[in-house]
């Protein structure tokens, strides 16, 4: 039976590469799409005209479908959406905001729309807004996160039984085995973020990639819940946050230390001391920087191997 996500996006494998800030440019997105998955450009760290450049370069690097991830709280979102429509991007993933604001506009302009959620409540609201697909992201995921702190294995069945449109699982997925588990729980595809940061094609700084390879269980933490919850690697910048918490600092003081450009400083410029290093719990499983194509191939191989083993259980 044909996979509904593969059919909807016209892709070979039900693997979506997350549109991550400071990592998911045209090189990574096109590499994933060329390997049979769906590559996404992460617009959250791009000025509008930079996004246009990445879309055009991606078109030149692949004949396969690709998409753009858009955080709905982006300041110049109207400019981003205008560029996406002008460039005829076929697939848009939205997150971090109300999908009601832009779903109709995108669908009226022939875009397939997926929306990322962290709870049943928001999944139902997104379905009501007319999105085509729900991405359910557990709080194992790196970067900005839901306040509910629900794990992927708990979240997927809850949302699956509540909606009537296809479901994509995200958060803590870095292998074919994890993909199989997510799909057994009701997902029709997986969105993979952290694993694709550790690729030559990701635009993240080599220093950041090396830190990911060093990560162990407990190396990441969900913090800054008073602002927007974010999962990051523990480093000297996080130690400063922790110190403020111990002092009983206010929300305003947390905002002040966060400032602007921390994620760029850490993930793109490679400042491991003062930068914010957003990555998921699954970084503890990542021990190699390998091309995106090899990741896709490894996912499919291990998925099929584990599926065969499960079928042999008496």
Image (cartoon, rainbow, N blue to C red):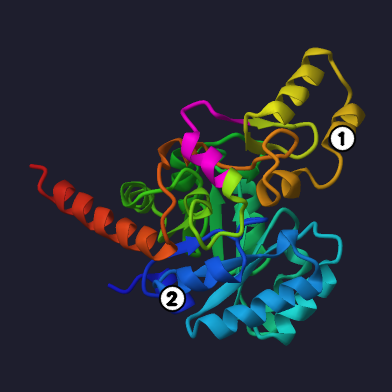
Read off the magenta span. 208-221
Image check: 89 left or right of 168?
A: right
Residue at horizontal 63 percent and vertical 36 percent from the top: 232
Q: Are marks 2 and 1 in contact (CB under 8 Å)?
A: no
Image check: 283 left or right of 148?
A: left
Tell me the quarter of the image containing the N terminus. Answer: bottom left
Residue density around tag 2, few if under 14, some if 14–19, many if 20 or more, within 10 Å: many
Q: Is residue 90 above or below residue 194?
A: below
Residue under numbered circle 2: 34
**Residue 292 among magenta residues:** no
The image position of residue 27, as x and y in percent, is 56, 70
From this viewpoint, is residue 113 visible?
yes
**Residue 217 among magenta residues:** yes
The image position of residue 296, as x and y in percent, is 37, 62
Q: Is residue 252 above or below residue 69?
A: above
> Which picture quadrant has residue 242?
top right
The image position of residue 14, as x and y in percent, is 40, 65
Residue under numbered circle 1: 255
Image check: 278 left or right of 291?
A: right
């Amino acid at each position: 039976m044909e996979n509904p996500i593969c059919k909807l996006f016209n892709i070979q494998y039900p693997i979506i590469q997350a549109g991550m800030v400071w990592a998911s440019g045209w090189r990574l997105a096109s590499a994933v799409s060329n390997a049979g998955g769906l590559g996404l450009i992460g617009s959250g760290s791009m000025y509008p005209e930079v996004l246009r450049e990445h879309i055009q370069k991606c078109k030149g690097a692949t004949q396969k479908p690709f998409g753009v991830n858009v955080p709905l709280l982006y300041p110049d979102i109207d400019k981003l959406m205008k560029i996406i429509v002008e460039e005829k991007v076929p697939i848009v993933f939205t997150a971090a905001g109300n999908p009601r604001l832009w779903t109709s506009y995108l669908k009226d302009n022939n875009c397939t729309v997926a929306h990322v959620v962290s709870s049943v409540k928001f999944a139902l609201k997104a379905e009501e807004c007319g999105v085509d697909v729900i991405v359910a992201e557990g709080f194992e995921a790196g970067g900005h996160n839901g306040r509910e702190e629900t794990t992927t294995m708990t979240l997927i069945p809850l949302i699956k039984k509540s909606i009537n449109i296809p479901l994509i699982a995200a958060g803590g997925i870095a292998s074919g085995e994890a993909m199989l588990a997510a799909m057994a729980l009701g997902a029709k595809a997986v969105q993979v973020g952290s694993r694709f940061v550790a690729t030559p094609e990701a635009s993240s700084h080599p220093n950041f990639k090396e830190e990911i390879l060093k990560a162990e269980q407990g190396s990441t933490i969900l913090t800054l819940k008073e602002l927007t919850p974010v999962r990051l690697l523990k480093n000297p910048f996080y130690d400063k946050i922790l110190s403020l918490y111990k002092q009983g600092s206010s929300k305003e003081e947390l905002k002040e230390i966060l400032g602007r450009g921390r994620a760029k400083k850490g993930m793109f410029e490679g400042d491991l001391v003062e930068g914010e290093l957003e990555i998921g719990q699954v970084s503890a499983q990542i021990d190699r920087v390998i091309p995106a194509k090899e990741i896709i191939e490894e996912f499919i191989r291990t998925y099929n191997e584990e599926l065969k083993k499960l079928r042999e259980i008496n």
